[in-house]
Image (tube, rainbow, N blue to C red):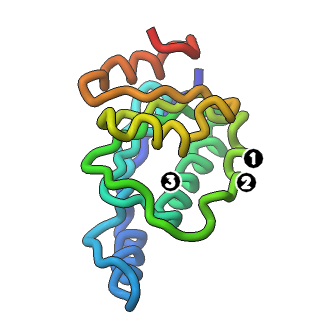
Amino acid sequence: MAPVLLLSPLGQEERAKAQAQAQEPGRETRETMGVEQLNSSNSTLHFKVTGTLTRGEVAWLQSKAVFGIKRWGKVRALVILEDFQGWKKGPGWDDMSFSNEHDPNIEKMAIVGPEQWRDWACAFAGKGFRSVSVEYFVPSQLERAKDWLSNDASEPT
């Protein structure tokens, strides 16, 4: 099992850059990025996703996963969708280079969110098309998701 990875929320510099970009003409205005890194436990990266997810936010999340992979070799991920609104339309969503390069080092991914996002989130995460075991849980099953991530079985109990 991979070691514990403790990660903090967005750094001040990253948050300032995201806020500056949000103020550029033609960009949506947002107070902060919609992806936040939470404290991690049981060898699992914890992320919270809110609002409309952008390609840049996914790239930021992936960079945090790469940091964990480089430091510890294998990681697991818990992604919590809270007030999630979907994905921002635009180019770059078809880029599979992260999955192609890093899937061997991602053991499992649990996504926790409202039932209405189950099919879309599983499709976005590539469930069934990647070597990473991906499962979706509703918010009332958060502890079940954490339990699933902490054991070695690939199927939820």
Pointer 2: residues within 10 angstroms few (<14), some, or many (20+)? few
- Whole-percent x, y for residue 39 in the image: 35, 40
The local secondary structure at tag 1 comes to helix
Say which residue appears at 34% left-offset and 43% top-offset.
81
Rendered position, 96 above or below 68: below
Residue linked to disc 2: 97
Tell whether 134 sits left or right of 92: left
Tell whether 39 sits left or right of 4: left
Disc 2 to disc 3: CB gap under 8 Å: no
Say which residue appears at 54% left-offset and 70% top-offset.
90
The residues bearing labels 2 and 3 have C-alpha atoms spaced at a distance of: 14 Å
Rendered position, 91 above or below 124: below
- Whole-percent x, y for residue 53 in the image: 42, 59
Task: Identify which amino acid the numbered label 2 is placed on.
Answer: Ser
Residue linked to disc 1: 101
The local secondary structure at tag 2 comes to helix
Identify the disc placed on residue 27: none
Say which residue appears at 39% left-offset and 81% top-offset.
27
Indicate the quadrant where residue 126 lies. top right
Task: Identify which amino acid the numbered label 3 is placed on.
Answer: Leu
Disc 2 to disc 1: CB gap under 8 Å: yes
Disc 1 to disc 3: CB gap under 8 Å: no
Task: Identify which amino acid the numbered label 1 is placed on.
Answer: Glu
Indicate the quadrant where residue 1 lies. top right
Q: Earlier in the sequence, mark 2 or mark 3?
A: 3
Say which residue appears at 49% left-offset and 29% top-offset.
43
Tell whether 87 sits left or right of 132: left
